[in-house]
Amino acid sequence: AAPPVSGKTPKAKKRKGSEGVKNSELEDLELERAAVTASIESAEQRMTQAARAAEKRKAEAARHKEKKKSDCRDIQKKFDKILHEHKMIQSDRNKIGKATEEARRRMESLEGALKDVERDKIRLRLDIKLATDAKAGRAA
């Protein structure tokens, strides 16, 4: 039971026609695949460039961070020095205050002694005057 020859021919033509459609679809798929592959390669290149740029920014950020740390250490040293100098100034101010108070007390004491000496001087002048007057009164 062989199939008729006329039945084979339309199938063969159908296959040729479908092969043409299949070839066209295959070409479309291959073109699409090539486009996807190119897109993937392009994306990989962009990803590699982005990774390099990110590494560069990361290294730059690390350098910046170290510089800021160094700047902070310098500022802290200056601040500590200023605090130390402030404490020294405060200490000197306290010493000067104590010395000033002591000098004020000595000055008050000396002023009191000076007043006592001036009073004694006035008394001695009065005593001399009285003695001179008494001597003059006895001589007269």
Image (cartoon, rainbow, N blue to C red):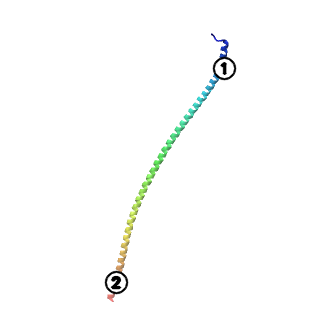
Quadrant where the N terminus sits is top right
Give whichever of 129, 28 is nearer the camera: 28
Q: Position of residue 19 (x, y in %)?
A: 64, 20
Q: CA distance from mark 2 to mark 1?
A: 163 Å
Q: Secondary structure at mark 2?
A: helix
Up/down of 18 relative to 133, above or below: above
Residue that carries the numbered disc 1 in the rendered image: 17
Q: Which mark is residue 116?
A: none
Which residue sits at x=66%, y=18%?
14
Up/down of 37 relative to 132, above or below: above
In the rendered structure, the answer to whether residue 48 lies left or right of residue 117 reads right
Which residue sits at x=66%, y=20%?
17
Q: Residue furthest front?
A: 1
Q: Residue furthest top?
A: 1
Query: In the figure, residue 89 lies in which quadrant?
Result: bottom left
Residue that carries the numbered disc 2 in the rendered image: 130
Query: In the figure, residue 18 lies in which quadrant?
Result: top right
Q: Amino acid at mark 1?
A: Gly
Q: Residue furthest left?
A: 138
Which residue sits at x=47%, y=46%?
70
Give whichever of 128, 108 is nearer the camera: 108
Q: Secondary structure at mark 1?
A: helix
Query: In the figure, residue 31 lies in which quadrant?
Result: top right
Number of residue marks: 2
| Neighbour tally class for label 2: few under 14, some 14-19, many 20 plus, Cα within 10 Å | few
Q: Position of residue 40 (x, y in %)?
A: 57, 31
* Dot 2 or dot 1, earlier in sequence: 1
Q: Position of residue 63 (x, y in %)?
A: 50, 42
Q: Position of residue 44 (x, y in %)?
A: 56, 32
Give whichever of 129, 63 is nearer the camera: 63
Q: Amino acid at mark 2?
A: Leu
